[in-house]
Amino acid sequence: MHGKNVELDKVVMRFGGFTAVQQTSLEIRAGEFFSILGPSGCGKTTILRMVSGFIEPSEGRVRIGGDDMGGRGPARRPTALIFQNLALFPLMSNWENVAFGLEARGLDKRTRRERAYELLALVGLEGKEAQRPGALSGGQRQRVAIARALAVEPAVLLLDEPLSALDLKLRQYMRAELKAIQRKTGVTFIFITHDQGEALTMSDRIAVMRAGVVEQVGTTDEIYDRPATPFVATFVGENNVLSGTVAEADAAYARIETPLGPVRARNQDALAAGQRAMVFVRPERASLVNGHDLDNRLTGRFERRDLEGSYVNLFFTVGDQPFIVHEPNLDRQAALEGEVRLGFQADDAVAMRAGALDDA
Ligand code: ATP
């Protein structure tokens, strides 16, 4: 098996008067684990359906491995699709489920069976070949569905929220499994999810979507450390937000006047003096001042604490806004009350133009 690249070239999808996907260009590389992440209704599934051929874009082109897919239905594309609802055949054995798509290819029963056994081994289900799906756990059934999708040797596997029906522990385990299967096969995976944890743990790159628009495409580090828009900053991971007006700015840093005092942050958005700006600080990048030499200092009113295991989650109010600090080394018994000094380094804060955060 080998993966192919997928290009969306100025693709638009309209349903009647409603534009579900605004003009989008994306290149997904061959053999990449690529996730499309966004809230419900943002257009993720619509993109997947355009790639798989269940719908044709209203404008633009979809190319796979350089070939224009225009006018080609799902059966004539080098893609396979896995849904949350797996649709395995309950009365067939696992190997027969996997071999199902191979009959149409004219392979004899022995070859089909051999191929199915190989694929079940690939997904870690040796010994389960003759059982029926009903005898398996949810995660194992998921793996049968993956083996079945891989049986037709797709160059691109499309996965539409395949883990969302599993319980939390299994979901986390299957993340690693899926990634390992992707690496072993080299098939291009396009994985749809609204769960940022899934996208961050499995992907080579992520496209973050909101309301029919791809707001950022990047590696997991880029998306997490250098969010391009206020929406990406708050949808992916937690972020504290401070708002104000740019007092001065150069190419590297901006000084923002906030109601809580001045704040220095990385100028990621070519901000200039006088503009409204938002500053984003991850809870794990903020800390109690406690003798630290920090570029930015604020006074917070201590509200409460939660022990998260490896760190303590501290909740403050600064001005009238919530502000969260993750402290890995705090003495659990340390007394905290009333006004507390907290802060963060300029390099750990991202300043960008204020934008709508309504759906965040
Ligand atoms: P979810 O995670 O809830 O499935 P999504 O991000 O996958 O969300 P899509 O299913 O792509 O979202 O839908 C995007 C928008 O397009 C939604 O507002 C949806 O109602 C609309 N839409 C999707 N398919 C059609 C259709 N066939 N006719 C009309 N509107 C549609």
Image (spheres, rainbow, N blue to C red):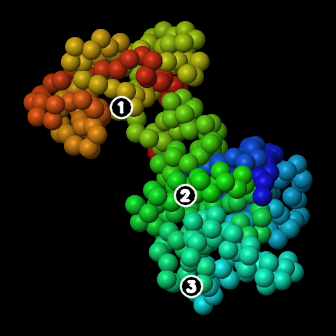
Residue at mark 3 to residue at mark 1: CA–CA distance: 46 Å
Residue 192 seen in the current view: no
- Residue 217 lies, in percent from the top left, at 64, 39
Sequence-wise, the earlier of marks 3 and 1 is: 3
Can the viewer see residue 115? Answer: yes
Label 2 sits on residue = 177
Q: Which residue is mark 3?
A: 132
27 in relation to 331, above or below:
below
Tally of numbered discs: 3
Mark 1: few/some/many CA within 10 Å (<14, 14-19, 20+): some
Toward the viewer: 149 or 291? 149
Q: Which of the marked residues, 3 or 2, is nearer the chain's N terminus?
A: 3
Give the class, few, some or many, for how many residues have Cα within 10 Å of label 3's Cα (few <14, many ≥20): some
Looking at numbered disc 1 in the image, what kind of residue is underneath it?
Answer: Glu
Label 2, residues with CA under 10 Å away: few <14, some 14-19, many ≥20? some
| Residue closer to the observer: 302 or 276 | 302
Image quadrant occupied by the N terminus:
bottom right
Does any atom of ligand 1 lie closer than 8 Å to the CB of label 2? no
Q: Amino acid at mark 3?
A: Arg
Q: Which residue is mark 1?
A: 284
Of labels 3 and 1, the one closer to you? 3
Instruction: Find residue 196 and report its horizontal and vertical position in percent.
Output: 49, 48
- Image position of 233 (left or right of 97): left
Q: What is the CA distance from the residue labelled 1 to the residue labelled 2? A: 28 Å
Instruction: Determine whether 79 is above or below 182 in the image.
Output: below
Taking the image as shown, residue 180 lies to the left or right of residue 292, namely: right
Say what amino acid the circle numbered 2 marks.
Glu
Does residue 107 appear to the left or right of 276 in the view shown? Answer: right
Question: Which residue: 52% across, 39% down?
Answer: 232
